[in-house]
Amino acid sequence: MAAEGSSFNEAFISYFTQDGIGYIIAFILFYRFAEAMLLKLTSPFLLDAIEKGGLGISTSEVGIMYGTAGMIALIAGGLLGGWLISRYGFRKCLWPMVFALHVPDVFYLYMAYSLPAKWIAYVLVSAEQFGYGVGLTAFTVYLMMICKGKYKTAHFAISTGIMALGMMVPGMISGKIQEALGYRHFFLAVCLLTIPGILVILKLPIKEEEAPSQTTA
């Protein structure tokens, strides 16, 4: 038991004494903060009646739009993100993937103001999910990059625990914010809340660069 406790303490200490740990924790907490708020209100926005600021789409159509088409787009984005990192390396792909995650949030702001036709909503929801898949890949790869030494598994567990907190808190407050602001201003707030997660990347420690895979003619 003493040995197990010592190993846990060593894993914990080695994680929180990494260079730039403050920026690492801030990145884990804020990179997906705005996206976590958006995810909680996506279905209610699509379902709510037009007079309430929503799009008034039926439950079955939302299931197809978000649950099927959106999921396919999410998986496709993740696959593309993984291929891009393996081909060009994490450092070169990071910023494009950051913007792939955050820029499509503007689509919901547009839909809240324009109340577009259903086919446009299909396209924009799928595009946002595709970008989310691409951007999530960079996040996941970075979590693996900071797990080094003999405590990789413990380090990844700590990172995922911090990540869960970063998803839980915005999810808890998103409903109250939407009720207070309405959908239009809520989605504007979501777009603005992407900024902290973007800015912290400027200070994010990236110690190693993967060599891009080589292809032969």
Image (cartoon, rainbow, N blue to C red):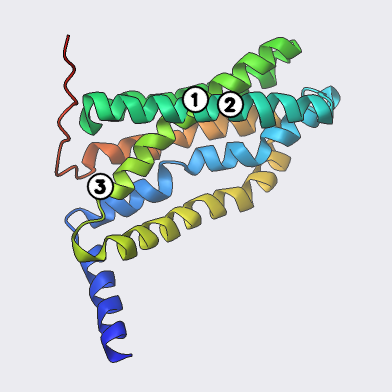
- Secondary structure beneath dot 2 equals helix
Residue that label 3 marks = 145
Is 14 displayed left or right of 66 in the figure? left
Disc 2 versus disc 1: distance between alpha carbons? Answer: 6 Å
Q: Percent position (x, y) of residue 28?
A: 38, 49
Q: Quadrant of residue 107?
A: top right
Kindly indicate whether the residue at mark 1 contacts the one at mark 2 (C-beta within 8 angstroms): yes
Residue 29 at x, y percent in the picture: 41, 50
Taking depth in this image into account, of 150 and 62 the one nearest to the observer is 150
Please tell me whether mark 1 sits on a helix, a strand or a loop: helix
The N terminus, quarter of image: bottom left
User: Tag 3's secondary structure?
Assistant: helix
Q: Amino acid at mark 1?
A: Ala
Camera-nearest label, 3 or 1: 1
Residue carrying label 2: 72
In the image, farthest residue toward the front: 217
Question: Can residue 216 be seen at all in this image of the molecule?
Answer: yes
How far across and down, in percent of the image, does residue 194 sit? 45, 34
Q: Position of residue 217 (x, y in %)?
A: 17, 8
Q: Amino acid at mark 3?
A: Met
- Label 1 sits on residue: 76
Task: Report crowding for label 1: few under 14, some 14 to 19, many 20 or more residues within 10 A (C-alpha).
Answer: some
